[in-house]
Protein backbone atom coordinates (compact mmCIF):
# COMPACT_ATOMS: atom_id res chain seq x y z
CA UNK A 1 0.00 0.00 0.00
CA UNK A 2 1.13 3.57 -0.71
CA UNK A 3 0.14 6.57 1.40
CA UNK A 4 -0.66 9.69 -0.63
CA UNK A 5 -0.50 13.11 0.99
CA UNK A 6 -3.42 15.25 -0.16
CA UNK A 7 -3.68 18.99 0.52
CA UNK A 8 -5.00 22.17 -1.04
CA UNK A 9 -2.79 23.88 -3.65
CA UNK A 10 -3.09 27.45 -4.87
CA UNK A 11 -3.63 27.80 -8.60
CA UNK A 12 -0.19 29.41 -8.88
CA UNK A 13 1.41 26.21 -7.57
CA UNK A 14 0.26 24.29 -10.68
CA UNK A 15 -0.12 20.87 -9.05
CA UNK A 16 0.89 18.26 -11.61
CA UNK A 17 -1.93 16.08 -12.85
CA UNK A 18 0.02 12.96 -11.87
CA UNK A 19 0.21 14.18 -8.26
CA UNK A 20 -3.54 14.70 -7.86
CA UNK A 21 -5.70 12.29 -5.87
CA UNK A 22 -8.12 11.84 -8.78
CA UNK A 23 -5.19 10.70 -10.95
CA UNK A 24 -4.03 8.24 -8.27
CA UNK A 25 -7.56 6.79 -8.16
CA UNK A 26 -7.60 6.58 -11.96
CA UNK A 27 -4.24 4.78 -11.94
CA UNK A 28 -5.67 2.28 -9.48
CA UNK A 29 -8.63 1.72 -11.79
CA UNK A 30 -6.46 1.10 -14.84
CA UNK A 31 -3.96 -1.19 -13.09
CA UNK A 32 -4.33 -4.83 -14.12
CA UNK A 33 -3.49 -6.44 -10.78
CA UNK A 34 -4.84 -9.93 -10.14
CA UNK A 35 -8.18 -10.47 -8.43
CA UNK A 36 -7.71 -12.81 -5.47
CA UNK A 37 -10.03 -15.78 -5.07
CA UNK A 38 -11.45 -14.68 -1.74
CA UNK A 39 -12.19 -11.25 -3.19
CA UNK A 40 -13.99 -12.78 -6.19
CA UNK A 41 -16.02 -14.94 -3.80
CA UNK A 42 -17.00 -11.91 -1.74
CA UNK A 43 -18.05 -10.05 -4.89
CA UNK A 44 -20.50 -12.88 -5.55
CA UNK A 45 -21.77 -12.71 -1.97
CA UNK A 46 -22.45 -9.01 -2.32
CA UNK A 47 -24.19 -9.44 -5.68
CA UNK A 48 -26.50 -11.98 -4.05
CA UNK A 49 -27.01 -9.63 -1.10
CA UNK A 50 -27.92 -6.68 -3.33
CA UNK A 51 -30.37 -8.83 -5.28
CA UNK A 52 -32.00 -10.10 -2.07
CA UNK A 53 -32.88 -6.68 -0.74
CA UNK A 54 -33.81 -5.39 -4.20
CA UNK A 55 -36.27 -8.25 -4.70
CA UNK A 56 -37.89 -7.58 -1.33
CA UNK A 57 -38.35 -3.90 -2.22
CA UNK A 58 -39.74 -4.24 -5.77
CA UNK A 59 -43.30 -3.35 -4.80
CA UNK A 60 -42.45 -0.34 -2.64
CA UNK A 61 -43.43 3.05 -4.08
CA UNK A 62 -39.95 4.64 -4.42
CA UNK A 63 -38.69 1.56 -6.26
CA UNK A 64 -41.73 1.36 -8.52
CA UNK A 65 -41.41 5.04 -9.39
CA UNK A 66 -37.71 4.73 -10.24
CA UNK A 67 -38.49 1.69 -12.38
CA UNK A 68 -41.27 3.61 -14.16
CA UNK A 69 -38.82 6.38 -14.98
CA UNK A 70 -36.34 3.85 -16.37
CA UNK A 71 -38.98 2.15 -18.51
CA UNK A 72 -39.42 5.39 -20.47
CA UNK A 73 -35.81 5.07 -21.69
CA UNK A 74 -35.73 1.85 -23.76
CA UNK A 75 -32.43 1.16 -25.50
CA UNK A 76 -30.71 -1.69 -27.32
CA UNK A 77 -28.51 -3.33 -26.24
CA UNK A 78 -29.18 -1.56 -22.95
CA UNK A 79 -29.31 -3.14 -19.51
CA UNK A 80 -31.93 -5.09 -17.59
CA UNK A 81 -34.18 -4.01 -14.72
CA UNK A 82 -34.54 -6.17 -11.62
CA UNK A 83 -37.88 -7.94 -11.79
CA UNK A 84 -38.61 -7.20 -15.45
CA UNK A 85 -36.64 -10.03 -17.04
CA UNK A 86 -33.97 -9.96 -19.76
CA UNK A 87 -36.35 -8.94 -22.55
CA UNK A 88 -36.83 -5.43 -21.16
CA UNK A 89 -33.78 -3.30 -21.91
CA UNK A 90 -33.24 0.33 -20.98
CA UNK A 91 -30.39 2.83 -21.11
CA UNK A 92 -27.67 1.74 -18.66
CA UNK A 93 -27.73 4.92 -16.59
CA UNK A 94 -31.47 4.45 -16.05
CA UNK A 95 -31.10 0.75 -15.25
CA UNK A 96 -28.48 1.78 -12.71
CA UNK A 97 -30.93 4.35 -11.30
CA UNK A 98 -33.86 1.96 -10.91
CA UNK A 99 -31.86 -1.02 -9.66
CA UNK A 100 -29.87 1.05 -7.17
CA UNK A 101 -33.06 2.48 -5.63
CA UNK A 102 -34.31 -1.09 -5.22
CA UNK A 103 -31.04 -2.12 -3.55
CA UNK A 104 -31.02 0.86 -1.20
CA UNK A 105 -34.71 1.21 -0.28
CA UNK A 106 -34.79 -1.15 2.71
CA UNK A 107 -31.37 -0.08 4.06
CA UNK A 108 -30.42 -3.74 4.23
CA UNK A 109 -27.16 -4.31 2.33
CA UNK A 110 -23.48 -3.91 3.13
CA UNK A 111 -21.66 -1.17 5.02
CA UNK A 112 -18.21 0.17 5.81
CA UNK A 113 -17.53 2.54 8.70
CA UNK A 114 -14.39 4.57 9.34
CA UNK A 115 -13.68 8.33 9.09
CA UNK A 116 -16.68 8.26 6.74
CA UNK A 117 -19.34 5.61 6.27
CA UNK A 118 -20.40 3.90 3.10
CA UNK A 119 -22.69 1.32 1.56
CA UNK A 120 -20.23 0.02 -1.05
CA UNK A 121 -22.80 -2.39 -2.47
CA UNK A 122 -24.23 0.76 -4.11
CA UNK A 123 -21.43 0.38 -6.68
CA UNK A 124 -22.85 -2.85 -8.05
CA UNK A 125 -26.03 -1.69 -9.90
CA UNK A 126 -24.28 0.89 -12.13
CA UNK A 127 -21.37 -1.44 -12.88
CA UNK A 128 -23.70 -4.33 -13.71
CA UNK A 129 -25.80 -2.10 -15.97
CA UNK A 130 -22.76 -0.81 -17.85
CA UNK A 131 -21.36 -4.33 -18.19
CA UNK A 132 -24.61 -5.57 -19.72
CA UNK A 133 -24.90 -2.63 -22.11
CA UNK A 134 -21.25 -2.82 -23.22
CA UNK A 135 -21.06 -6.59 -23.57
CA UNK A 136 -18.51 -7.26 -20.83
CA UNK A 137 -17.83 -10.60 -19.20
CA UNK A 138 -18.44 -11.72 -15.65
CA UNK A 139 -14.71 -11.73 -14.91
CA UNK A 140 -14.45 -8.10 -16.06
CA UNK A 141 -17.38 -7.20 -13.81
CA UNK A 142 -15.73 -8.90 -10.82
CA UNK A 143 -12.58 -6.81 -11.33
CA UNK A 144 -14.61 -3.62 -11.68
CA UNK A 145 -16.54 -4.26 -8.47
CA UNK A 146 -13.31 -5.00 -6.57
CA UNK A 147 -11.83 -1.71 -7.80
CA UNK A 148 -14.94 0.32 -6.93
CA UNK A 149 -15.08 -1.13 -3.42
CA UNK A 150 -11.38 -0.34 -2.98
CA UNK A 151 -11.78 3.29 -4.01
CA UNK A 152 -14.85 4.01 -1.89
CA UNK A 153 -13.50 2.24 1.18
CA UNK A 154 -10.04 3.82 0.94
CA UNK A 155 -11.62 7.26 0.62
CA UNK A 156 -13.91 6.50 3.57
CA UNK A 157 -10.94 5.49 5.71
CA UNK A 158 -9.22 8.82 5.15
CA UNK A 159 -11.71 11.59 4.39
CA UNK A 160 -14.68 12.41 6.60
CA UNK A 161 -17.63 13.93 4.80
CA UNK A 162 -20.28 13.82 7.51
CA UNK A 163 -18.15 16.01 9.80
CA UNK A 164 -18.89 18.80 7.32
CA UNK A 165 -22.51 17.74 6.72
CA UNK A 166 -21.69 16.37 3.25
CA UNK A 167 -23.53 13.19 2.23
CA UNK A 168 -21.47 10.02 1.95
CA UNK A 169 -22.32 9.50 -1.73
CA UNK A 170 -19.60 12.05 -2.54
CA UNK A 171 -17.20 9.08 -2.26
CA UNK A 172 -19.53 6.89 -4.33
CA UNK A 173 -19.48 8.99 -7.50
CA UNK A 174 -15.69 8.65 -7.87
CA UNK A 175 -15.73 4.96 -6.93
CA UNK A 176 -18.30 4.09 -9.59
CA UNK A 177 -16.36 6.13 -12.17
CA UNK A 178 -13.19 4.24 -11.25
CA UNK A 179 -15.00 0.91 -11.43
CA UNK A 180 -16.35 1.79 -14.86
CA UNK A 181 -12.83 2.64 -15.98
CA UNK A 182 -11.66 -0.80 -14.87
CA UNK A 183 -14.67 -2.49 -16.49
CA UNK A 184 -14.16 -0.84 -19.87
CA UNK A 185 -10.35 -0.83 -19.90
CA UNK A 186 -10.24 2.94 -20.33
CA UNK A 187 -7.07 5.07 -20.42
CA UNK A 188 -6.03 6.67 -17.14
CA UNK A 189 -6.67 10.17 -18.55
CA UNK A 190 -10.29 9.32 -19.36
CA UNK A 191 -10.92 7.82 -15.93
CA UNK A 192 -9.30 10.84 -14.28
CA UNK A 193 -11.65 13.22 -16.08
CA UNK A 194 -14.67 11.07 -15.23
CA UNK A 195 -13.75 10.95 -11.54
CA UNK A 196 -13.49 14.75 -11.48
CA UNK A 197 -16.97 15.24 -12.91
CA UNK A 198 -18.51 12.46 -10.82
CA UNK A 199 -17.23 14.02 -7.61
CA UNK A 200 -18.19 17.53 -8.67
CA UNK A 201 -21.85 16.70 -9.31
CA UNK A 202 -22.46 14.26 -6.42
CA UNK A 203 -21.36 16.45 -3.52
CA UNK A 204 -24.53 17.30 -1.59
CA UNK A 205 -25.52 18.07 1.99
CA UNK A 206 -26.43 15.52 4.64
CA UNK A 207 -29.94 16.94 5.05
CA UNK A 208 -31.11 13.84 3.19
CA UNK A 209 -30.31 11.92 6.42
CA UNK A 210 -31.40 14.52 8.97
CA UNK A 211 -34.74 15.55 10.44
CA UNK A 212 -37.72 14.14 8.52
CA UNK A 213 -35.86 11.69 6.30
CA UNK A 214 -37.50 11.00 2.94
CA UNK A 215 -37.22 8.45 0.14
CA UNK A 216 -34.32 10.49 -1.27
CA UNK A 217 -32.15 8.45 1.09
CA UNK A 218 -32.66 5.55 -1.33
CA UNK A 219 -32.41 7.71 -4.44
CA UNK A 220 -29.17 9.51 -3.47
CA UNK A 221 -26.78 6.63 -4.26
CA UNK A 222 -28.76 5.83 -7.40
CA UNK A 223 -28.24 9.43 -8.52
CA UNK A 224 -24.50 9.14 -7.84
CA UNK A 225 -24.21 5.96 -9.92
CA UNK A 226 -26.23 7.47 -12.75
CA UNK A 227 -24.06 10.61 -12.72
CA UNK A 228 -20.89 8.49 -12.80
CA UNK A 229 -22.06 6.64 -15.92
CA UNK A 230 -22.83 9.95 -17.59
CA UNK A 231 -19.44 11.33 -16.50
CA UNK A 232 -17.63 8.37 -18.07
CA UNK A 233 -19.64 8.74 -21.27
CA UNK A 234 -18.70 12.41 -21.46
CA UNK A 235 -15.02 11.75 -20.72
CA UNK A 236 -14.88 9.02 -23.36
CA UNK A 237 -15.96 11.66 -25.89
CA UNK A 238 -12.91 13.73 -24.98
CA UNK A 239 -14.48 16.26 -22.63
CA UNK A 240 -12.64 17.47 -19.55
CA UNK A 241 -13.76 18.17 -15.97
CA UNK A 242 -12.93 20.57 -13.10
CA UNK A 243 -9.41 20.03 -11.75
CA UNK A 244 -7.74 19.68 -9.39
CA UNK A 245 -11.10 18.55 -8.07
CA UNK A 246 -9.88 17.64 -4.58
CA UNK A 247 -6.84 19.92 -4.15
CA UNK A 248 -7.87 23.10 -6.01
CA UNK A 249 -8.04 26.33 -4.04
CA UNK A 250 -11.77 26.51 -4.82
CA UNK A 251 -12.16 22.72 -4.71
CA UNK A 252 -13.82 20.14 -2.49
CA UNK A 253 -11.28 20.11 0.34
CA UNK A 254 -10.84 23.88 0.54
CA UNK A 255 -14.52 24.82 0.68
CA UNK A 256 -16.53 21.73 1.60
CA UNK A 257 -14.24 19.71 3.88
CA UNK A 258 -11.40 20.62 6.27
CA UNK A 259 -10.38 23.83 4.53
CA UNK A 260 -7.31 25.37 2.88
CA UNK A 261 -4.89 24.16 5.57
CA UNK A 262 -6.17 20.59 5.59
CA UNK A 263 -4.01 17.54 5.02
CA UNK A 264 -5.30 14.04 4.32
CA UNK A 265 -3.39 10.79 4.02
CA UNK A 266 -5.10 8.42 1.58
CA UNK A 267 -3.69 4.91 1.39
CA UNK A 268 -4.17 3.01 -1.88
CA UNK A 269 -2.80 -0.28 -3.27
CA UNK A 270 0.59 -0.01 -4.94
CA UNK A 271 0.87 -0.79 -8.67
CA UNK A 272 0.31 -4.50 -9.18
CA UNK A 273 -1.15 -4.93 -5.68
CA UNK A 274 -4.62 -6.53 -5.67
CA UNK A 275 -7.69 -4.67 -4.43
CA UNK A 276 -8.85 -6.36 -1.21
CA UNK A 277 -10.86 -3.69 0.60
CA UNK A 278 -14.16 -5.45 -0.05
CA UNK A 279 -13.13 -7.97 2.62
CA UNK A 280 -13.17 -5.19 5.23
CA UNK A 281 -16.85 -4.36 4.62
CA UNK A 282 -19.74 -6.16 6.29
CA UNK A 283 -23.39 -6.80 5.56
CA UNK A 284 -26.58 -6.50 7.58
CA UNK A 285 -28.67 -9.21 9.16
CA UNK A 286 -31.37 -6.65 10.02
CA UNK A 287 -33.03 -3.97 7.91
CA UNK A 288 -31.85 -0.91 9.82
CA UNK A 289 -29.00 1.60 9.93
CA UNK A 290 -25.77 -0.37 10.44
CA UNK A 291 -24.95 1.20 13.79
CA UNK A 292 -28.20 -0.26 15.13
CA UNK A 293 -27.32 -3.82 14.06
CA UNK A 294 -25.42 -4.78 17.20
CA UNK A 295 -28.07 -3.17 19.41
CA UNK A 296 -30.84 -5.23 17.82
CA UNK A 297 -28.84 -8.34 18.70
CA UNK A 298 -28.20 -7.05 22.23
CA UNK A 299 -31.86 -6.13 22.80
CA UNK A 300 -32.92 -9.58 21.68
CA UNK A 301 -30.61 -11.20 24.23
CA UNK A 302 -31.47 -8.73 27.02
CA UNK A 303 -35.26 -9.00 26.93
CA UNK A 304 -35.36 -12.25 28.88
CA UNK A 305 -33.26 -10.77 31.68
CA UNK A 306 -35.38 -7.64 31.98
CA UNK A 307 -38.74 -9.37 32.34
CA UNK A 308 -41.63 -6.90 32.55
CA UNK A 309 -40.72 -4.05 30.21
CA UNK A 310 -43.42 -1.94 31.81
CA UNK A 311 -41.22 -1.81 34.92
CA UNK A 312 -38.32 -0.18 33.05
CA UNK A 313 -37.60 3.30 34.46
CA UNK A 314 -34.92 4.36 32.01
CA UNK A 315 -32.40 2.99 29.51
CA UNK A 316 -29.07 4.64 28.73
CA UNK A 317 -27.01 3.52 25.75
CA UNK A 318 -23.33 4.52 25.83
CA UNK A 319 -21.94 4.36 22.31
CA UNK A 320 -19.64 6.09 19.85
CA UNK A 321 -19.76 9.78 19.02
CA UNK A 322 -21.00 8.98 15.53
CA UNK A 323 -23.80 6.67 16.65
CA UNK A 324 -24.91 9.08 19.37
CA UNK A 325 -25.06 12.07 17.03
CA UNK A 326 -26.40 10.35 13.89
CA UNK A 327 -29.05 7.91 15.14
CA UNK A 328 -29.17 8.70 18.86
CA UNK A 329 -30.54 11.48 21.01
CA UNK A 330 -27.40 13.49 20.26
CA UNK A 331 -28.89 14.26 16.85
CA UNK A 332 -31.47 16.47 18.62
CA UNK A 333 -34.06 15.40 16.05
CA UNK A 334 -37.54 15.31 17.63
CA UNK A 335 -38.61 13.24 14.63
CA UNK A 336 -36.58 10.32 16.03
CA UNK A 337 -39.09 10.12 18.89
CA UNK A 338 -42.23 10.68 16.80
CA UNK A 339 -44.58 7.73 16.07
CA UNK A 340 -45.70 9.55 12.90
CA UNK A 341 -42.15 9.75 11.54
CA UNK A 342 -41.32 8.22 8.16
CA UNK A 343 -39.86 4.75 7.84
CA UNK A 344 -36.58 6.35 6.79
CA UNK A 345 -36.53 8.41 9.99
CA UNK A 346 -37.35 5.44 12.24
CA UNK A 347 -34.55 3.53 10.52
CA UNK A 348 -32.23 6.25 11.88
CA UNK A 349 -33.66 6.23 15.42
CA UNK A 350 -31.70 3.93 17.72
CA UNK A 351 -34.22 4.63 20.46
CA UNK A 352 -37.13 3.31 18.38
CA UNK A 353 -35.17 0.35 17.08
CA UNK A 354 -33.98 -0.71 20.52
CA UNK A 355 -37.49 -0.44 21.99
CA UNK A 356 -39.08 -2.57 19.25
CA UNK A 357 -36.30 -5.17 19.38
CA UNK A 358 -36.72 -5.40 23.16
CA UNK A 359 -40.45 -5.95 22.86
CA UNK A 360 -40.42 -8.33 19.88
CA UNK A 361 -37.12 -10.15 20.29
CA UNK A 362 -36.63 -9.87 16.54
CA UNK A 363 -36.55 -7.42 13.66
CA UNK A 364 -38.44 -7.43 10.36
CA UNK A 365 -37.91 -5.21 7.31
CA UNK A 366 -41.64 -4.40 7.02
CA UNK A 367 -43.49 -5.26 10.25
CA UNK A 368 -41.02 -3.45 12.52
CA UNK A 369 -41.69 -0.17 10.71
CA UNK A 370 -45.46 -0.48 10.27
CA UNK A 371 -47.37 2.62 11.45
CA UNK A 372 -49.44 0.53 13.85
CA UNK A 373 -46.21 -0.87 15.30
CA UNK A 374 -44.76 2.60 15.83
CA UNK A 375 -47.97 3.78 17.52
CA UNK A 376 -48.29 0.89 19.98
CA UNK A 377 -48.66 2.57 23.41
CA UNK A 378 -46.23 0.25 25.18
CA UNK A 379 -43.65 0.87 22.47
CA UNK A 380 -44.01 4.64 22.64
CA UNK A 381 -43.68 4.58 26.43
CA UNK A 382 -40.53 2.43 26.33
CA UNK A 383 -39.08 4.31 23.35
CA UNK A 384 -39.26 7.62 25.21
CA UNK A 385 -37.38 6.19 28.19
CA UNK A 386 -34.27 5.56 26.07
CA UNK A 387 -31.42 8.01 25.58
CA UNK A 388 -27.91 7.74 24.21
CA UNK A 389 -24.65 9.22 25.44
CA UNK A 390 -21.19 9.26 23.97
CA UNK A 391 -18.74 6.81 25.55
CA UNK A 392 -15.14 7.89 24.87
CA UNK A 393 -13.86 4.32 24.66
CA UNK A 394 -16.59 3.39 22.20
CA UNK A 395 -15.64 6.42 20.10
CA UNK A 396 -11.99 5.38 20.17
CA UNK A 397 -12.83 1.83 19.10
CA UNK A 398 -15.20 3.07 16.37
CA UNK A 399 -12.34 5.09 14.91
CA UNK A 400 -9.68 2.41 15.33
CA UNK A 401 -7.87 1.32 12.17
CA UNK A 402 -7.38 -2.17 13.62
CA UNK A 403 -10.26 -4.38 12.39
CA UNK A 404 -9.87 -6.61 15.44
CA UNK A 405 -10.45 -3.69 17.79
CA UNK A 406 -12.99 -1.71 15.80
CA UNK A 407 -16.45 -1.67 17.38
CA UNK A 408 -19.87 -0.42 16.32
CA UNK A 409 -21.85 -1.23 19.43
CA UNK A 410 -21.93 0.02 22.98
CA UNK A 411 -23.03 -0.58 26.56
CA UNK A 412 -26.65 -0.59 27.72
CA UNK A 413 -27.73 0.28 31.27
CA UNK A 414 -31.33 -0.54 32.19
CA UNK A 415 -32.69 0.92 35.44
CA UNK A 416 -35.85 -0.74 36.74
CA UNK A 417 -38.60 0.88 38.76
CA UNK A 418 -37.37 -0.87 41.92
CA UNK A 419 -33.87 0.61 41.46
CA UNK A 420 -32.21 -2.57 40.23
CA UNK A 421 -29.85 -2.27 37.28
CA UNK A 422 -29.20 -4.58 34.35
CA UNK A 423 -26.16 -3.94 32.15
CA UNK A 424 -24.69 -5.57 29.09
CA UNK A 425 -22.59 -4.59 26.10
CA UNK A 426 -21.78 -5.69 22.57
CA UNK A 427 -18.92 -4.65 20.27
CA UNK A 428 -20.08 -5.87 16.87
CA UNK A 429 -23.23 -7.36 15.38
CA UNK A 430 -23.63 -11.12 15.32
CA UNK A 431 -23.34 -11.15 11.50
CA UNK A 432 -20.08 -9.14 11.50
CA UNK A 433 -16.95 -11.10 10.47
CA UNK A 434 -15.88 -11.01 14.14
CA UNK A 435 -19.38 -11.51 15.50
CA UNK A 436 -21.11 -14.49 17.06
CA UNK A 437 -22.57 -15.72 13.73
CA UNK A 438 -20.51 -14.31 10.83
CA UNK A 439 -22.13 -14.31 7.41
CA UNK A 440 -20.75 -16.70 4.81
CA UNK A 441 -22.07 -17.84 1.44
CA UNK A 442 -24.79 -19.97 3.03
CA UNK A 443 -26.13 -17.00 4.99
CA UNK A 444 -26.15 -14.74 1.93
CA UNK A 445 -28.05 -17.36 -0.05
CA UNK A 446 -30.50 -17.91 2.82
CA UNK A 447 -31.09 -14.15 3.05
CA UNK A 448 -31.83 -14.07 -0.68
CA UNK A 449 -34.34 -16.93 -0.47
CA UNK A 450 -36.08 -15.38 2.54
CA UNK A 451 -36.37 -11.88 1.10
CA UNK A 452 -37.11 -12.89 -2.49
CA UNK A 453 -39.43 -15.76 -1.58
CA UNK A 454 -42.54 -13.61 -1.62
CA UNK A 455 -41.82 -12.34 -5.12
CA UNK A 456 -39.85 -14.96 -7.07
CA UNK A 457 -40.65 -18.60 -7.73
CA UNK A 458 -38.34 -21.21 -6.26
CA UNK A 459 -37.08 -22.10 -9.72
CA UNK A 460 -36.29 -18.47 -10.53
CA UNK A 461 -34.46 -18.00 -7.24
CA UNK A 462 -32.36 -21.11 -7.84
CA UNK A 463 -31.56 -20.05 -11.40
CA UNK A 464 -30.39 -16.64 -10.23
CA UNK A 465 -28.16 -18.06 -7.50
CA UNK A 466 -26.60 -20.51 -9.94
CA UNK A 467 -25.90 -17.66 -12.36
CA UNK A 468 -24.33 -15.55 -9.59
CA UNK A 469 -22.12 -18.35 -8.35
CA UNK A 470 -20.76 -18.81 -11.89
CA UNK A 471 -20.11 -15.06 -12.26
CA UNK A 472 -16.41 -15.34 -13.06
CA UNK A 473 -17.12 -17.73 -15.95
CA UNK A 474 -20.04 -15.86 -17.53
CA UNK A 475 -19.56 -14.54 -21.05
CA UNK A 476 -21.20 -11.35 -22.23
CA UNK A 477 -24.35 -13.12 -23.42
CA UNK A 478 -24.86 -14.85 -20.08
CA UNK A 479 -24.09 -11.70 -18.10
CA UNK A 480 -26.74 -9.82 -20.08
CA UNK A 481 -29.36 -12.06 -18.47
CA UNK A 482 -28.06 -11.72 -14.92
CA UNK A 483 -31.32 -10.56 -13.38
CA UNK A 484 -34.51 -12.07 -11.96
CA UNK A 485 -38.04 -12.03 -13.31
CA UNK A 486 -41.31 -11.34 -11.49
CA UNK A 487 -44.44 -12.17 -13.50
CA UNK A 488 -46.59 -9.09 -14.19
CA UNK A 489 -44.27 -6.61 -12.50
CA UNK A 490 -43.82 -4.37 -15.52
CA UNK A 491 -47.57 -4.15 -16.12
CA UNK A 492 -48.17 -3.28 -12.46
CA UNK A 493 -45.55 -0.52 -12.41
CA UNK A 494 -47.35 2.83 -11.92
CA UNK A 495 -47.14 5.47 -14.62
CA UNK A 496 -47.41 9.21 -14.28
CA UNK A 497 -45.02 12.06 -13.70
CA UNK A 498 -43.70 14.47 -16.29
CA UNK A 499 -42.23 11.84 -18.60
Image (cartoon, rainbow, N blue to C red):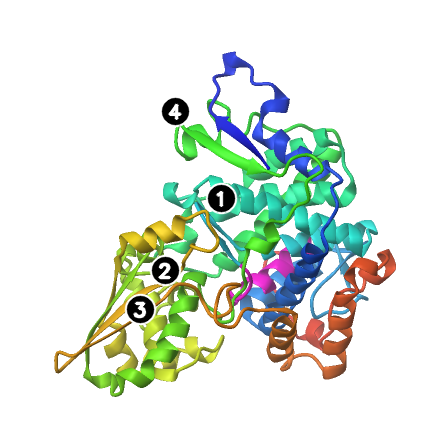
- 2 and 4 marks in contact (CB < 8 Å): no
Question: What is the CA distance from the residue labelled 2 to the residue labelled 4?
Answer: 34 Å
Q: Is disc 2 placed on a helix, strand or loop?
A: loop
Q: Please name the residue that numbered disc 4 is placed on.
A: 261
Question: What is the CA distance from the residue labelled 4 to the residue labelled 1?
Answer: 20 Å
Q: Is disc 4 placed on a helix, strand or loop?
A: loop
- Secondary structure mostly seen in magenta is helix
Q: Residue at x 75, y 77 (%)?
A: 462
Between residue 420 and residue 75, name the one nearer to us.
Answer: 420
Q: Please name the residue that numbered disc 3 is placed on.
A: 351
| Residue 109 within the magenta-colored segment of the rendering | yes
Q: Is disc 1 placed on a helix, strand or loop?
A: helix
Q: Is disc 3 placed on a helix, strand or loop?
A: helix
Residue 245, relative to residue 392: is it above or below?
above
Q: Point out residue 135 in the picture as x, y percentages from the top left corner.
A: 84, 52
Q: Point out residue 55 in the picture as x, y percentages from the top left corner.
A: 63, 72
Q: Quadrant of the N terminus?
A: top right
Residue bounds of the magenta highlight: 93-110
- 1 and 2 marks in contact (CB < 8 Å): no
Q: Please name the residue that numbered disc 1 is placed on.
A: 157
Tag 3 or tag 1, which sits nearer the N-term?
1
Label 1 Cα crowd, 10 Å radius (few <14 / some 14-19 / many 20+): many
Q: Point out residue 57 in the picture as x, y percentages from the top left corner.
A: 58, 71
Tag 4 or tag 2, which sits nearer the N-term?
2
Amino acid sequence: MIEHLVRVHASTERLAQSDQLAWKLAELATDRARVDGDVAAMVINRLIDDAAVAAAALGRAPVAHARAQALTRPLSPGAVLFGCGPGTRVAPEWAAWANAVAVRELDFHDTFLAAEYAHPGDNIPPLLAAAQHCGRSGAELVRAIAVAYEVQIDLARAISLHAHKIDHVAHLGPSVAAGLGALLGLPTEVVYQAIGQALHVTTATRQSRKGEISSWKAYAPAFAGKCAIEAVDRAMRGERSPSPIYEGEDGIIAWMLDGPEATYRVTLPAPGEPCRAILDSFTKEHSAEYQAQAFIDLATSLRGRIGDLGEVAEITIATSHHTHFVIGTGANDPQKLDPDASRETLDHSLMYIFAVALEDGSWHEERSYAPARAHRPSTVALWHKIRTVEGPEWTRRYRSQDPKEQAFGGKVRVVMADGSVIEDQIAVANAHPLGARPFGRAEYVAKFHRLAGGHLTGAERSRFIERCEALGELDAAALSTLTFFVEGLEAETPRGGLL
